[in-house]
Image (cartoon, rainbow, N blue to C red):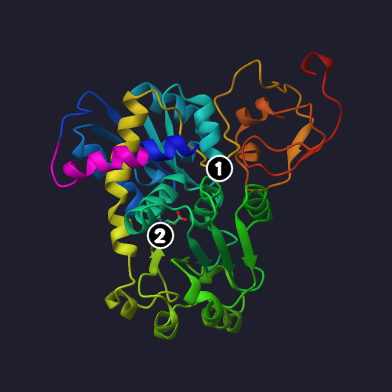
């Protein structure tokens, strides 16, 4: 919630003094970094944060070095990691993998990116950067521009905006690359003013923040469509000339053609400072999660999923439900199915792991109802 976000920011402010040195605050802790997908900034800044705090690190940056070749389940790997370390930081290609890990682990789990769903620590970095610039995230006028459909960083950023007041948000993307409808729905439900389909050149003069998202060239089957997308979402000097001098350009990086290098020389560019904030933010998170009783960081939207408790969830020994999202952890991990569905008192069921709709195939045994 908002108080937790403010606590992270205040702790990050404290951590700034150690960002170029070393302090023994976590010298009795082991951080386990499980990176099933490539990463540059997220993994290195977590590891750097852990080292600056005096913690030790175990983990991997490429799952080929593990027993994934024998189809070892994520659930079993998480059991082992939680036996070896005090906290787990995980990036995984499956939607909901972090929720599954949090359900299994008996140590805190930080989601460093799951599938196309969430990247909450990136969103905290983004908000901290905006706070540094403008004093607060509330009352800001923000555009998020690029390939929005599959960007977990953009989704978490937008979901996190629901914790602030009076935010105006423009979502600008190429055709068929829109932000997920569930994210737009949550934004609107929580009072964020959302405008979709505007041209960047028409709104850029209103903005405090221009958040640029990678165009994801690999998702375009037709190169002419990609060229059109660059026209819609690429940042140019023309845009910056129209912008207010105080407007900042952000990007979670890595960038591609949507953010040309000559923008680096403008006074609006903040993306390297934003990425550098990864270290103090992640120092704060490691400290809070290992020593202050904060729990798992998986989502930062309003529907937080806590840890499994037998009273709240219904173990499904004979699965009669299935998730409609093919990339959901529930299809890949045998153990995930045990905890579905979440809430039988509602008419519409959501998947515990990825929030997508559930389909019922039969009637659950009355023991579970
Ligand atoms: C991510 C990346 O490297 O892929 N960037 C980042 O964490 N700063 C983007 C992502 O995970 O979606």
Residue 350 is situated, as x and y percent measured from the top left of the image, at 71, 38
Q: Secondary structure at mark 2?
A: loop
Mark 2, residue position: 252
Image quadrant containing the C terminus:
top right
Q: Identify the residue at image location x=52%, y=65%.
A: 144
The residue stretch that appears in magenta: 8-22
**Front-most of residues 368 and 35:** 368
| Residue 152 percent location from the top left of the image | 52, 53
The residue positioned 39% from the left and 28% from the top of the image is: 81
Dot 2, crowdedness within 10 Å: few (<14), some or many (≥20)? many
Distance from mark 2 CB to nearest ligand 1 atom below 8 Å = yes
In the image, residue 87 sits, relative to residue 199, either above or below, namely above
CA–CA distance in space, label 2 to label 1: 19 Å
Quadrant of the rendered structure where residue 342 is?
top right
Q: Is residue 106 left or right of residue 355?
A: left
The kind of secondary structure the magenta stretch mainly shows is: helix
Q: Earlier in the sequence, mark 2 or mark 1?
A: 2
In the orientation shown, which residue stands out farthest toward the right?
A: 362
* Ligand 1's quadrant: bottom left
With respect to residue 234, does 41 lie above or below?
above
Quickly name the residue at label 1: 301
Front residue of 8 and 40: 8
Seen from the viewer's position, the closer of residues 78 and 156 is 156
Q: Is residue 173 magenta?
A: no
What x and y, as percent, mark residue 128? 36, 50
Is residue 283 visible in the rendered structure shown here? yes
Where residue 217 appears, as percent x and y from the top left, is 52, 72
Label 1: element kind: loop
330 relative position to 58: left or right: right
Q: Residues within 10 Å of mark 1 (few under 14, many from 20)?
A: many
């Amino acid at each position: 919630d908002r108080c937790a976000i403010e606590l992270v920011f205040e702790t990050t402010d404290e951590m700034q003094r150690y960002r170029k040195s070393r302090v023994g605050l976590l010298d009795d802790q082991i951080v386990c970094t499980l990176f099933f997908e490539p990463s540059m900034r997220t993994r290195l800044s977590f590891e750097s944060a852990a080292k600056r705090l005096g913690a030790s690190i175990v983990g991997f940056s490429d799952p080929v070095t593990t027993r994934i070749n024998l189809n070892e389940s994520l659930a079993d790997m998480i059991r082992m990691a939680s036996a070896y370390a005090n906290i787990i930081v995980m990036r995984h290609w499956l939607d909901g993998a972090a929720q599954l890990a949090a359900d299994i682990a008996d140590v805190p789990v930080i989601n460093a990116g799951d599938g196309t769903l969430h990247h909450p620590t990136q969103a905290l970095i983004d908000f901290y950067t905006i706070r540094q610039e403008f004093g607060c995230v509330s009352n800001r006028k923000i555009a998020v521009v690029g390939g929005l459909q599959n960007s977990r960083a953009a989704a978490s950023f937008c979901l996190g905006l629901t914790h602030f007041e009076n935010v105006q948000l423009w979502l600008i993307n190429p055709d068929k690359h829109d932000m997920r409808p569930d994210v737009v729905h949550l934004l609107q439900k929580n009072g964020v003013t959302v405008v979709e389909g505007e041209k960047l050149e028409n709104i850029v003069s209103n903005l405090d923040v221009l958040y640029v998202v990678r165009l994801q060239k690999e998702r375009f089957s037709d190169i002419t469509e990609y060229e059109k997308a660059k026209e819609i979402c690429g940042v140019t000097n023309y845009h910056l000339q129209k912008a207010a001098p105080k407007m900042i350009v952000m990007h979670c990086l890595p960038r591609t053609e949507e953010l040309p290098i000559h923008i680096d020389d403008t006074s609006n560019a903040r993306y390297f400072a934003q990425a550098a904030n990864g270290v103090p933010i992640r120092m704060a998170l490691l400290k809070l999660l290992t020593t202050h009783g904060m729990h798992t960081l998986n989502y930062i939207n309003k529907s937080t999923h806590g840890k499994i408790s037998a009273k709240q969830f219904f173990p499904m020994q004979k699965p009669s439900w299935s998730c409609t999202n093919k990339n959901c952890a529930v299809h890949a991990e045998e153990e995930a199915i045990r905890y579905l569905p979440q809430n039988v008192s509602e008419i519409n069921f959501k998947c515990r792991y990825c929030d997508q709709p559930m389909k019922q195939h039969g009637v659950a045994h009355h023991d579970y109802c």
